[in-house]
Image (cartoon, rainbow, N blue to C red):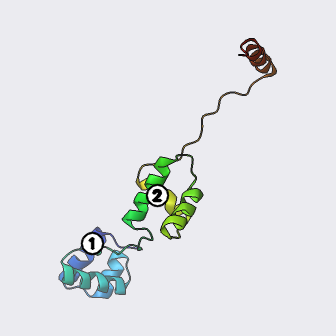
């Protein structure tokens, strides 16, 4: 579990008052090694927060993302799998359908379903058939 900046500041303050690492660890409910790391980080950076971590490398480029978005906008009825297969066929990039969905979500493109009306009853069918017979060319 990550330590909060408040816990780190408390540990550093106690160390600077002259307490040993084990006593500080007991007092702030951390391990001695955690206190050691916090103090070393504070000496190196002067901050109580953790350094930013690197994220996972994206498997699609900006160009691939634009292709996914433009393909979807050209045909809003395509599924994520359809766009995935088109990306593989045209650009040679193999990604999962979830990658395609995330890319579309980043572009604020949400899935659309066709609107459906109420089911037709036998009376509706009869009325439609009668209307069609009356209005035959």
Q: Residue 88, can we see it? A: yes
Which element is circle 1 on?
A: loop
* Residue nearest the viewer, comparing 131 with 68: 131
Seen at 54% across and 61% down, the residue is 86
The structure residue drawn at horizontal position 58% and vertical position 41%, both measured from the top left corner, is 113
Residue 120: x %, y % from top left: 74, 25
Q: Nearer the viewer, residue 106 or 16?
A: 106
Labelled disc at residue 68: 2
- 72 and 52: which is toward the camera: 72
Name the residue rendered at 54%, 58% in the picture. Answer: 83
Residue, x 37% and y 79% (percent of image)? 30
**Quarter in which the C terminus is drawn:** top right
> Is the N terminus in the top left, top right, bottom left or bottom right quadrant?
bottom left
Secondary structure at badge 2 equals: helix
List the single residue furthest toward the front: 137
Mark 1 vs mark 2: which is more N-terminal? 1
| Relative vertical location of residue 79 with respect to residue 88 in this rendering, above or below | above
Residue 110 seen in this snapshot: no
Residue located farthest toward the top when viewing the structure as drawn? 134
Q: Are marks 1 and 2 in contact (CB under 8 Å)?
A: no
Spatial CA distance of label 1 from label 2 is 38 Å
Marker count (numbered): 2
Neighbours of disc 2 within 10 Å: few (<14), some (14-19), many (20+): many
**10 Å neighbourhood of mark 1: few (<14), some, or many (≥20)?**
some
Q: Quadrant of residue 32?
A: bottom left
When the figure is inspected, residue 83 is found, relative to residue 60, above or below; the finding is above
Q: Which residue is mark 1?
A: 49
């Amino acid at each position: 579990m990550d330590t909060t900046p408040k816990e780190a500041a408390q540990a550093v303050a106690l160390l600077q008052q002259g307490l040993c690492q084990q006593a500080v660890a007991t007092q702030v409910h951390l391990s001695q090694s955690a206190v050691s790391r916090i103090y070393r980080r504070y000496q190196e950076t002067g901050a109580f927060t953790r350094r930013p971590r690197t994220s996972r490398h994206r498997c699609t480029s900006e160009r691939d993302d634009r292709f996914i978005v433009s393909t979807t906008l050209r045909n809003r009825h395509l599924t994520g799998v359809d766009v995935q297969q088109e990306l593989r066929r045209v650009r040679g990039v193999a990604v999962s359908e979830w990658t395609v969905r995330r890319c579309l979500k980043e572009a604020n493109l949400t899935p659309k379903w066709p609107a459906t009306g109420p089911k037709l009853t036998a009376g509706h069918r009869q009325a439609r058939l009668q209307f069609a017979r009356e209005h035959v060319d």
